[in-house]
Amino acid sequence: MDGSMFDQAKRLVARAADYQKELESSPLASQLIDSSTPVVWLGNAAPGGWLTVATNPSPKEFIGRDQQLLSGRKARFYIREQGVSMEEYKKDDRKLAETIRFYETYFLRDSAYRSWFGRPGGAKLEGFLNGMGGSFYSLDGYQSVIHSDLFPIATKTHMGRIKQKKELLGSAFSMAFFEDKLKFLNPNLIILLGREHCQLLERHGIQFSDPVRIERYPGAAWQTGFHSNLGIPVLGLHFKPSEQFLGLGGGMDRDHQSHGKYGTKQALNEIGSEVWENLSAVFPALHR
């Protein structure tokens, strides 16, 4: 990352820190994780890669199974020292630089949240991406993929259970910050994880095609879109490869195939491969 890009990155982190500070005086204050910092992206922020987009960082990125804060070698992100406020944090260049180092090396460290992202060459979201020809883990021959969220602040409760979810994701801050983050990351492809995110961004200017179902896995649908302001192709998934049964529940699809099968490495590879074949026909300039 060159000096200019690094300065942009620090400004984005400081801006997200300002917002987290604002939330400390809001009804969401009880949901903020003590000593946590914003998560603006995960992975090597080199322009021209693919970007997956979900809701917000999981509480498991900061809190371990013992309900204690992940710190030291277990830390996945920068942890503020005891007594350091968000205001002090965002004004400290060293702290911001260390925060960015955590982002950039996330998938290079064993501490990455692999039970959600998947292991190198495994299932989950990584398995789907491998089928498309991409990887979070810099695998040889695969397109580099990084991750980000619409809302850059981790909450103690999963966002889906928070009453203000729609308000937070669709807020002026979230939409403007996401737009500026896209300008900074400059991806070649945006991959939205979940129909609700497609619907949200459709209301904010991204035009989508009608959904298409996966031939061998008809319980999973996807659609194409285009971010006209930035000229970036968009893939919208109506399922979540990173979550059990792809967020479809434990039922059967129209072919009487269990949704549970959709979460296997083989199925995710096949789904990703079929999506890529069709996506690359819609956007011939896409590369991997």
Image (tube, helix red, strand yellow):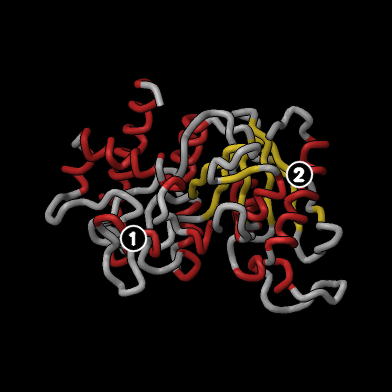
Can you give x and y, in whole percent of width and height, for residue 200 in the image? 59, 51
Instruction: Count neighbours of disc 1 (C-alpha within 10 A) and say few if under 14, some if 14 to 19, many if 20 or more.
Output: many
Q: Which mark is residue 62?
A: 1
Task: Identify the residue at horizontal 53%, vertical 28% (top origin).
Answer: 47
Can you give x and y, in whole percent of width and height, for residue 20 in the image? 30, 50
In the rendered image, the residue lying farthest to the front is 140
- 70, 204: nearer the viewer: 70
- 80, 71: nearer the viewer: 71
What amino acid is found at the position of numbered circle 1 in the picture? Phe
Q: Circle 2 sits in a helix, a strand or a loop, which is it?
A: helix
Image quarter where the C terminus lies is top right
Horizontal arrangement in the rendering, residue 38 relative to residue 135 (left or right): left
Image quarter where the N terminus lies is top left
Q: Is residue 11 above or below residue 256?
A: above
Q: Which residue, given by chain and number where applicable, does mark 2 sit on? A: 276
Task: Identify the residue at horizontal 44%, vertical 40% (top origin).
Answer: 177
What amino acid is found at the position of numbered circle 2 in the picture? Trp
- 205, 141: nearer the viewer: 141
Q: Of marks 2 and 1, which one's residue comes earlier in the chain? A: 1
Quadrant location of residue 278?
A: top right
Q: CA distance from mark 2 to mark 1?
A: 33 Å
Quadrant location of residue 206?
A: top right
Can you give x and y, in whole percent of width and height, for residue 286 in the image? 72, 32
Task: Identify the residue at horizontal 49%, vertical 46% (top origin).
Answer: 148
Can you give x and y, in whole percent of width and height, for residue 217 in the image? 80, 63
Task: Identify the residue at horizontal 33%, vertical 26% (top origin).
Answer: 7
